[in-house]
Image: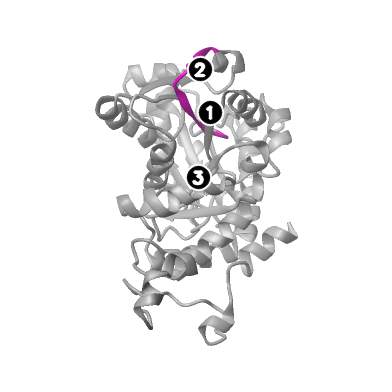
Amino acid sequence: MQRDELALTHVGENQSEYLNAVTPPVFLTSLHIFDSMEGYQNHKEDGAYVYGREGNPTVEILEKKVAALEQGCKAVAFSSGMAAASAAILSVCRAKSHIICMRDVYGPVKGILNGYFIPRMEMRVSYWDGKDLDELESLICEDTDLILLESPATFVFSAVDIRGVTRIAGKRGIRTYIDNTYCTPLYQKPLEMGVDIVMHTMSKYIGGHSDIIGGILVVNDEELGKTLYENIRPWFGGILGPMEAWLAIRGLRTLNLRVEKHQQTAFAVAEYLEKHPKVEKVYYSGLPTHPQAELIRSQQSGHTGLMSFTVHGGAETAIKLVNQLKVFEIGCSWGGFESLALCPLVNASQEELDFLHLGEKGRGLIRIHCGLEGSEVLLEDLEQALKQI
């Protein structure tokens, strides 16, 4: 943890370069100037900044910190998590590539696969449940270029055997990508387990204050990092803004303290819900009763504040419960200071519910994020709401 704490606080910073200010400035500039034409001509060799679409000093400080946290050689920051995810796909795949994607990765990722890459670039996508490694092997084709993962997964927090997947992919020369947002760089290190590209949505725990949109990719391959940094990001214009980068740097200062508090509160809430007679099932990666608890212990060093559960009575009762909550607010995101609740699949089609292997019960799934208000406050709020259903 000492290495992580140094990355959160000091890595990437050089106070002597900005008048010994303890906090780096926000470089709100669109371009950088040179003393000579020779300097301008040689800027790539010298590593100099030129234009804000290509790079920015504040953004680079953030990138160095996250690369150190994930123990990667290069991090590249983007204007949103979806910009980062799309860039990852574009950096690895080509027209007519075959992709294997977990069924319950972040919904908009499936959206761009189905709505753009398949019809416009003639890619093929095979969806996988994330559990059966034999099935994964059976899906691999000669033109499979990428496997998209998320662990723990979005709705019911099932884990993927990351090492198992990367062993299979490595034998075939297939790249792997994982959304590591839930665990943060502190509680799971996918690059150490053989993953090629790690993605974080920075509106969640890295930002931590629900005031930025951003995404970041981390790799351990110099050439892949160069492709992302020098080609994909500047060509598509998806760089993170300097103000957002500064806010993410601020968020990193307290990341270890915040996620530990989120985790403590979530443990108390999950244990309470698991024992409540009106609760049908609790999905939280930190519970000892999780069916994949052993796998989770082997690849995660901690848990955060997100979980889901179902109550007896289905979707109608679930909506009533969410509407009765007072401290938990209704909102679609998570990872900030605030506690949130939502029935994310209440309007899902039966086709989508069946695709996710959730069936009708998915409509009544309640997802909550345990914020920083403290476990006592949140337990009281859940108790009063549960009494009313």
Q: Residues within 10 Å of mark 3 (few under 14, many from 20)?
A: some
Q: How many marks?
A: 3
* Residue at 34% in and 74% down: 29
Q: Earlier in the sequence, mark 2 or mark 3?
A: 2
Q: Secondary structure at mark 1?
A: loop
Q: Residues within 10 Å of mark 2 (few under 14, many from 20)?
A: many
Q: Earlier in the sequence, mark 1 or mark 2?
A: 2
Q: Verify CB contact (< 8 Å) between mark 1 and mark 2.
A: yes
Q: Residues within 10 Å of mark 1 (few under 14, many from 20)?
A: some
Residue 164 percent location from the top left of the image = 65, 25
Q: Secondary structure at mark 2?
A: loop
Name which residue type carries label 3.
Leu
Residue 95 percent location from the top left of the image = 33, 29
Frontmost residue, 159 versus 176: 176
* Residue at 28% in and 32% down: 116
Q: Mark 2 or mark 3, which is nearer to you?
A: 3
Name which residue type carries label 2.
Ile
Q: Is residue 278 left or right of residue 97?
A: right
Residue at the extreme bottom of the image, as rendered: 19
Residue at the extreme front of the image, as rendered: 38
Q: Which residue is mark 2?
A: 140
Q: Secondary structure at mark 3?
A: helix
Q: Is residue 15 left or right of residue 356?
A: right
Q: Which residue is mark 3?
A: 224
Quarter of the C terminus within the rendering = top left
Q: Is residue 102 visible?
A: no
Q: Verify CB contact (< 8 Å) between mark 2 and mark 3.
A: no
Residue 352 location, quadrant: top left
Look at the image and give the residue range highlighted in magenta.
138-152
Q: Which residue is mark 1?
A: 174
Q: Earlier in the sequence, mark 1 or mark 3?
A: 1
Q: Verify CB contact (< 8 Å) between mark 1 and mark 3.
A: no
